[in-house]
Amino acid sequence: MTTRAPARARPRKRRKPDPIISWVRRLDRTRPGLPAYVLEELAGFYGHQIWQRRLDPTSELILTILTQNSADTNAELAFEELRKAYPSEGPTEQHRPGPGWGGRGLPDGVVPDWIAVEIAPLDELIEVIRPGGLPVAKAKGIQASLRAIRAARGDHSLEFLAEMSALEARDWLTGIPGIGKKTASVLLLFSFGMPLMPVDRHVERVARRIGMIPAKVTSGTDPHDLFLAMLQPDQMYEAHVNLIQHGRVICHARNPEHERCPVRARCRFVDPKAP
Ligand code: SF4
């Protein structure tokens, strides 16, 4: 009679740790209280921020596309040209840019006629938005986005997003080719107050220098999602506005003014061993 060797237990596969969760846990362990410290110091310097709607969501989307790789002041010029070239019969809208915005703020005006923008000859639209910079790519992006929204919804309104959770709404928007997490987060944060963090170059530079997010881009740690794991939903709006202000006012790309900085004591850019 042959005896069977006892079955060996198969080694369990270890799940790869989520790099976002790993980063947040490590930060908590090695630099406890850092995000709260940064938010508190920045609020002491720039003030507490109260959310208010900046624009209707479709205008916010198109204005955000116009800001891509351009100064906010130039995006404003291009948006005003859109209003002039394709006026709608809608009511006058007020732009409430708030302190995170880098332009002067749009004057009151009617929302552009989005159908007219969507079906405008491409060459014409390119000329209209030329003051905003990169007009060819942006004209194509604007028309493609408007087309995709109308194809999915029957019109260009994005008010329906208010019924979704923040991440569902972000997924819906990023399903449109050309709309990334930053653009989607801007729209949802500023038009609906959804707790999402748009990470533009200012926010990213400041956060990487301080060490809130890894100093270098690493796979699986998209800063948009790192912030969602690191902050409470009710901290998101103020964190975004004050980080962006800090990048504009003090933590410049070149010659950051460390001596004026309220978070210097815990910044890894000035002290690699900062707590
Ligand atoms: S200490 Fe300097 S590098 Fe660090 S956040 Fe402040 S200004 Fe930026």
Image: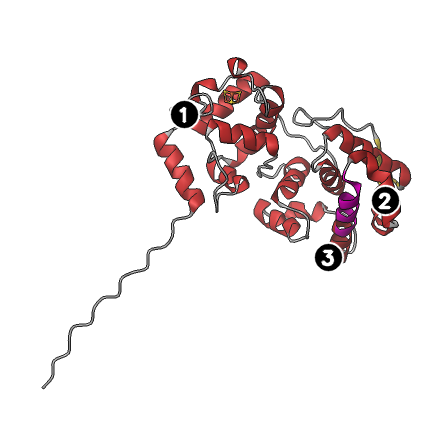
Amino acid at the residue labelled 1? Pro
Q: Report the mark closest to the observer, 3 or 1.
A: 1
Quadrant where the C terminus sits is: top left
In the image, residue 172 lies at what x, y percent? 64, 52
Give me the residue at 32% from left, 59% from top.
Answer: 13
Among numbered discs 2 and 1, the one appearing first in the sequence: 2
Which residue lies under the disc numbered 1? 272
Q: Amino acid at mark 3?
A: Ala
Identity of the residue drawn at 66% across and 41% down: 183
Q: Secondary structure at mark 1?
A: loop
Q: Residue 144: where, in percent of width, then height?
A: 76, 52
Q: Earlier in the sequence, mark 3 or mark 2?
A: 2
Residues at marks 2 and 1 touching, judged by CB atoms closer than 8 Å: no
* Quadrant of res 59: top right
* Element at label 2: helix
Q: Which residue is mark 2?
A: 125
Q: Residue at x 38, y 33 (%)?
A: 28
Q: Determine the main secondary structure of the stretch shown in magenta.
A: helix
Distance from disc 2 to disc 1, alpha carbons, whole Å, reads 49 Å
Q: Which contiguous range is marked in magenta?
A: 134-144
Residue reaching furthest to the front: 254
At label 2, counting other C-alpha atoms closer than 10 Å, the crowd grade (few under 14, some 14-19, many 20 or more) is: many
Q: Is residue 107 above or below residue 87?
A: above
Instruction: Tell whether 26 sits left or right of 261.
Output: left
Give the residue number, with chain letter if any, for mark 3. 152
Q: Earlier in the sequence, mark 3 or mark 1?
A: 3
Query: Does the segment drawn in magenta span residue 70?
Result: no
Q: Where does residue 250 sit, x and y in percent of width and height?
A: 58, 19
